[in-house]
């Protein structure tokens, strides 16, 4: 039996700018909701209704769950969807008259948008309640991650900050889902020796690890990642299977690159006349994705063919078969090496399915339907595996991540190295504040809590990653500067033992995240 | 052969490397010019910029809105960060298995008094690897504030001190970084076992090789795989 341990990570940075009627980067959330989180929930609910036997694990990051449960952002999402539906009606009419090859897809986009909005409203605008219902049926293991998805290896000299990221992530999960998370998604698979002890101290049972962590381990591995790794603290590590995930993930040869699949970039927001798309793009005249896309990837050409849904669905079936066939073949090889019931740890970003790879959700559905009742495969979850008390192996691992190069190069290069000078200083100053003001309630306590909030937000891995990728750099840099600047406001004021009340109220309003934060999280016992 | 992505190096480091490589007048060249000359020298420019790295993650998950950043520049509350902090200190962070990144600051008081006294600065690097200690100095200027330090694989650590040297050659340690562990892998030091571990080696490869036979993009993995292949070919 080949055990499939599918772990999806759903994460977006905290973006909320109510001071603007519309804010471009909030679309990251809205697009992911409409194209991934809601359609995926509908797909999983469909499987449940059909009696398909499936299991998977989903990590909803603390920043994402905060946004998904934020009434103001929920309201703005409804506005976004109404715009999308309105454009869909226009597109139906336009394509029927001028571009009949696109008519079916225009209808499909419109229909999907209506169904997604309808499900969103049925769930009281909180889609997490739908996922929680599936969790309660033992279909999904729900886990959390670092508070703001900080890349933890770069902060290992500051255990208080790492602990704050872990503890606040777990606390947020507990507050939103009403129970503790057993698993903890290490942001970017970033591990360093000693991190597992901090996870253990916070009650975490397992985490996921980068694929090369086993061959490069300090100890000799026998199971090569096909059984859980027992880290020195007793926390279990599940090693990502790069070989299998690359079938989907590779930007060159992965299934999503197939020429019959829908092209991500060719969107009417970029090529139809401005007068037509103006109400549905960003003000004043910034062309953005509208979600209405009618072309197939076709190949490396500007001359794209029209998308054919039936042809794409044929490919989905073929790729689902190929995916399982590849695992089955690998399973034979692994079992012939003496490892029975190998575990394939399949870790992906959730937004790949539906958002980036339009047919990705149908692919997952096809794989899950084929696996259900199969004698060769079974979906499982990390906690189920741990509870089975099967074989594991103790290993000491080196630092690692799933980023390019396998270490920290993405989050520490010439484009972003400058940020650590400021963040490290802010952490040291936060530790200093907890020592100088050990017992502050009321206003000063709130002021210090706000400083902790700003510091956690500054530590997000998204900002250095965006700087590295060269996309939306200006926004990332401004966010980082704002959070560190806000932290410095508190530090300067508290150095004079004063509170800037008006500033505090505004800051609390603009960052409605971590309402239960406590600045003592940043206490460093070594510096007492 | 160059072992680091030149894009990640500071101008001072690039000039230093360019000098070592015999590129004249590097001090007067811009960062971009030095990178371009170094790339030319090392033959890194493969002339096929369209060729994507097959090991890159499929997508970052965040949509690139394409050069529209100017529209968000009026975000409220953007504040300037301090140019420097009033502390003399040095930090060391692990970038990957073969490079560490050091950055430091010198308080204005320290900087003024050291420069008034005609002192110079250097980074004193200590690497302890498998019981052997190596120490060397890297001269830096008062305008430098960061440096990449190369490290070997092994069982040990690296530490960097910021040191002032006065006119008489007397050294004063201004700050010492925390130690960073070296990458210590079982298979880098147990090559004698490799020839008896073929099935295990194949098992390892099955996790980290894609359908085209390419390995996960990690230098230490490539090193281990090369060692296995070397041991394998030795038997033939």
Image: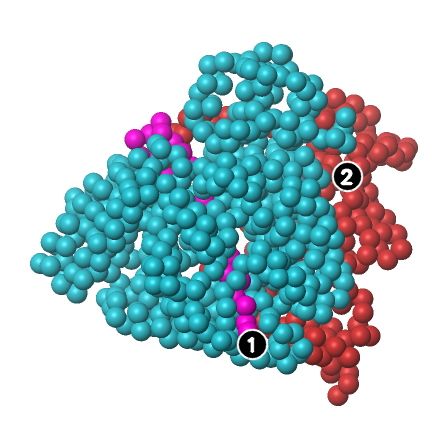
Chain colours: A cyan, B red
Query: Does the magenta-highlighted stretch encompass residue B132?
Result: no
Query: Does the magenta-highlighted stretch encompass residue A22?
Result: yes
Residue A367 is at least partly visible in this image? no
Q: Which residue is mark 2?
A: B177
A194 or A368, which lies in front? A368
In the rendered image of this protein, does residue A227 appear above or below residue A30?
Answer: below
A455 or B172, which lies in front? A455
- Mark-to-mark CA distance, 1 and 2: 46 Å
Q: Is residue A44 left or right of residue A456?
A: left
Secondary structure of residue under mark 2: loop
Q: Residue A376: x, y in percent?
A: 50, 75
Q: Nearer the viewer, mark 1 or mark 2?
A: 1
In the rendered image of this protein, does residue A238 appear above or below residue A77?
Answer: below
Q: Check the picture and name the quadrant holding the C terminus of chain A.
A: top right
Q: Which mark is residue A330?
A: 1
Examine the image and state in which quarter residue B1 appears. bottom right
Residues under numbered marks 1 and 2 in contact, where contact means CB atoms less than 8 Å apart: no
Q: Is residue B121 left or right of residue B21?
A: right
Range of residues picked out in magenta = A1-29
What chain is tagged by disc 2? B
User: At x 78% / y 44%, what residue is drawn?
Assistant: B179
């Amino acid at each position: 039996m080949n055990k499939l341990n599918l772990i999806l990570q759903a994460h977006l940075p905290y973006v909320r700018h109510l001071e603007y009627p519309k804010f471009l980067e909030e679309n990251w959330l809205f697009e992911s909701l409409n194209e991934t989180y809601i359609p995926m929930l509908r797909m999983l609910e469909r499987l449940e209704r059909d009696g398909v036997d499936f299991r998977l694990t989903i990590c909803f990051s603390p920043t994402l769950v905060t946004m998904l449960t934020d009434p103001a952002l929920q309201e703005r999402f409804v506005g976004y969807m109404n715009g999308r539906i309105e454009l869909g009606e226009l597109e139906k009419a336009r394509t029927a008259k001028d571009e009949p090859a696109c008519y079916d897809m225009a209808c499909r986009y419109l229909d999907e948008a209506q169904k997604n909005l309808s499900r969103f409203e049925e769930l009281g605008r909180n889609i997490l309640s739908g996922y929680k219902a599936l969790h309660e049926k033992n279909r999904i293991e729900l886990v959390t991650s670092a508070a703001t998805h900080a890349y933890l290896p770069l902060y290992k000299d500051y255990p208080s900050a790492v602990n704050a990221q872990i503890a606040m992530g777990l606390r947020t999960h507990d507050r939103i889902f009403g129970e503790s998370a057993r698993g903890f998604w290490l942001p970017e698979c970033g591990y360093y020796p000693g991190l597992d002890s901090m996870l253990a101290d916070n009650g975490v049972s397992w985490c996921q690890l980068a694929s090369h962590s086993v061959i490069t381990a300090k100890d000799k591995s026998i199971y090569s990642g096909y059984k859980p790794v027992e880290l020195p603290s007793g926390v279990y590590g599940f090693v990502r299977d790069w070989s299998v995930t690359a079938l989907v993930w590779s930007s060159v040869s992965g299934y999503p690159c197939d020429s019959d699949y829908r092209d991500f970039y060719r969107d009417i927001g970029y090529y139809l006349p401005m007068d037509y798309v103006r109400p549905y793009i960003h003000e004043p005249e910034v062309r953005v994705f509208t979600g209405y896309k009618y072309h197939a990837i076709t190949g490396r050409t500007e001359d794209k063919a029209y998308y054919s849904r039936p042809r794409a669905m044929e490919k989905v079936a073929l790729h689902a078969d190929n995916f399982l066939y590849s695992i089955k073949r690998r399973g034979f090889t692994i079992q012939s090496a003496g490892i029975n019931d190998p575990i394939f740890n399949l870790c992906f970003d959730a937004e790949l399915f539906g958002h980036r790879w339009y047919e990705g959700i149908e692919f997952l559905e096809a794989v899950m339907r084929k696996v259900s009742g199969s004698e060769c495969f079974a979906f499982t979850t990390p906690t189920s595996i741990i509870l089975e008390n099967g074989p594991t192996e103790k290993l000491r691992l080196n630092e690692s991540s799933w980023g390019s190069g396998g270490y920290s190069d993405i989050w520490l290069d010439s484009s972003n190295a400058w940020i650590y000078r400021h963040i490290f200083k802010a952490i040291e100053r936060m530790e200093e504040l907890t020592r100088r003001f050990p017992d502050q309630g009321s206003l000063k306590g709130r002021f210090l809590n706000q400083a902790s909030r700003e510091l956690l937000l500054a530590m997000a891995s998204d900002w250095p990653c965006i700087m590295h990728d060269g996309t939306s750099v200006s926004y990332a840099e401004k966010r980082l500067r704002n959070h560190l600047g806000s932290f410095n406001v508190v530090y300067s004021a508290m150095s004079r033992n004063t509170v800037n009340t008006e500033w505090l109220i505004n800051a609390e309003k603009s960052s409605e995240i971590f309402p239960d934060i406590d600045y003592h999280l940043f206490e460093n016992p070594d510096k007492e | 052969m160059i072992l680091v992505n030149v894009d990640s190096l500071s101008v001072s480091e690039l000039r230093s490397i360019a000098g070592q490589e015999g590129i004249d007048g590097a001090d007067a060249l811009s960062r971009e010019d030095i990178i371009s000359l170094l790339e030319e020298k090392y033959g890194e420019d493969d002339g096929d910029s369209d060729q994507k790295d097959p090991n890159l993650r499929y997508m970052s998950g965040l949509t690139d809105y394409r050069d529209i950043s100017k529209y968000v520049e009026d975000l409220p509350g953007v504040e300037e960060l301090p140019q420097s902090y009033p502390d003399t200190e040095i930090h060391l962070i692990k970038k990957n298995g073969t490079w560490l990144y050091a950055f430091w600051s010198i308080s204005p008081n320290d900087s003024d008094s050291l420069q008034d006294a005609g002192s110079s600065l250097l980074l004193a690097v200590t690497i302890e690897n498998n019981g052997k200690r190596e120490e060397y100095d890297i001269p830096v200027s008062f305008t430098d504030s960061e440096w990449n330090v190369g490290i070997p694989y092994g069982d040990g650590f690296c530490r960097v001190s910021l040191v002032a040297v006065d006119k008489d050659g007397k050294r004063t340690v201004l700050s010492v970084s925390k130690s960073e562990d070296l990458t210590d892998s079982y298979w880098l030091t147990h090559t004698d076992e490799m020839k008896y571990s073929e099935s295990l080696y194949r098992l390892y490869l099955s996790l980290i090789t894609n359908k085209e036979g390419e390995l996960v993009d990690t230098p230490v993995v490539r090193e281990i795989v090369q060692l296995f292949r070397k041991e394998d070919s030795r038997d033939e």
